Amino acid sequence: MSYENTSEYERFAEIYKVWTSTAASTNQNLAFYIDTYLAAQGTIVELGIGDGRIAIEAARRGCSLTGVDLSPAMLDRCRKLSAEAGVADRLTLIESDFRHFDIPAPATLITLPYHSIGHLPSIEDKREAIQHIFENLSPGGLFVFDDFFMTPQLMSHMRAVQLRAAYQNTEGNDCLLWVTSLIDELKQSISVVTWEDILDDNGEMQKRHYRRLSLSWLEPDQISALLIDTGFTIEACYGDFQRTPFETARAREQVWVARKPD
Ligand SMILES: C[S@@+](CC[C@H](N)C(=O)[O-])C[C@H]1O[C@@H](n2cnc3c(N)ncnc32)[C@H](O)[C@@H]1O
């Protein structure tokens, strides 16, 4: 089964590097997940590995990981970048949905970084994924993931039209990458809309490429209920990637650490 966002990432892959290198939270989530991987004693699986932004950096520091992703274009990028970094032999890549991946033995640590749980549109899809993750962890194993913490401030920031980046493409053309988001508060869904303007030598627009990403979020009590219903013990919920305990008034993210009981 595939979602709209499978094909979304086939096109989004082209701008993923620019996207992550200009995002507010990527440096922080990178450092958090690398520390989490380095502390893991056993097998590590990253769901939604994407272009390997986090996994390749962890592999450079000695980790071996399995990465799962539904998008062939993102996995191709991961293969290319991991080969360039000289760590391809430390990554095992599996093309699969979060909810149905198949690994040879239960893992010690499964992660789902960078709001990627939000690519599953409904709470039932998320429940199915969390159940499958639980079944694929060894006793005592950890599930670590993050989600948006949606506040009025974050919504108005995301709704604003922003110039995200200015750069040259591989053909040497100047490009401008713009973004805004359509947010449905009742459905807890986000449609991220980007448009990339490709300019000619006179600064005239030659082409415009639109790309979308469909996302969603859960409130903290919804996540907590899903984890507990599945059988996880909640070890921590942080409000940022510096591991500050979650407090509604100050949190900028939801960063969850859940353990499968022994
Ligand atoms: C936001 S990116 C995260 C990539 C990487 N973990 C990072 O932090 O940069 C989300 C990734 O999840 C993948 N993805 C989206 N829905 C998926 C699904 N249902 N099953 C597996 N992968 C999925 C996308 O193809 C994309 O590569």
Image: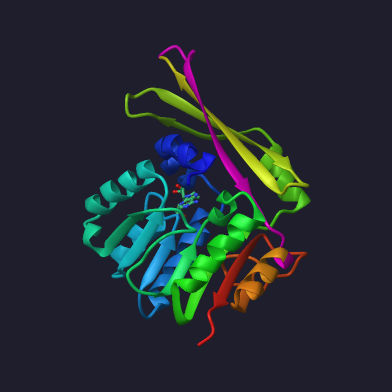
94, 176: nearer the viewer: 94
Q: Residue at point 49% right, 37% down?
A: 8
167, 81: nearer the viewer: 81
Q: x%, y% of residue 239?
A: 65, 67
Residue 18 can be seen, yes or no: no
120, 76: nearer the viewer: 120
Residue 234 placement, left or right of 156: left
66 lies above or below 209: below
Q: Residue at point 44% right, 37% down?
A: 15
Q: Point out the residue furthest to the bottom here.
A: 262
Residue 220 sits inside the magenta stretch: yes
Q: Residue at point 50% right, 59% down?
A: 113
Q: x%, y% of residue 153?
A: 75, 49
Q: Image quadrant of residue 224?
A: bottom right
Q: Image quadrant of residue 138?
A: bottom left
Residue 85 sits inside the magenta stretch: no
Residue 171 placement, left or right of 192: left
Q: x%, y% of residue 43?
A: 35, 74
**Range drawn in magenta:** 201-221
Q: Residue at point 71% right, 64% down?
A: 222
Residue 111 can be seen, yes or no: yes
Q: x%, y% of residue 227?
A: 62, 71
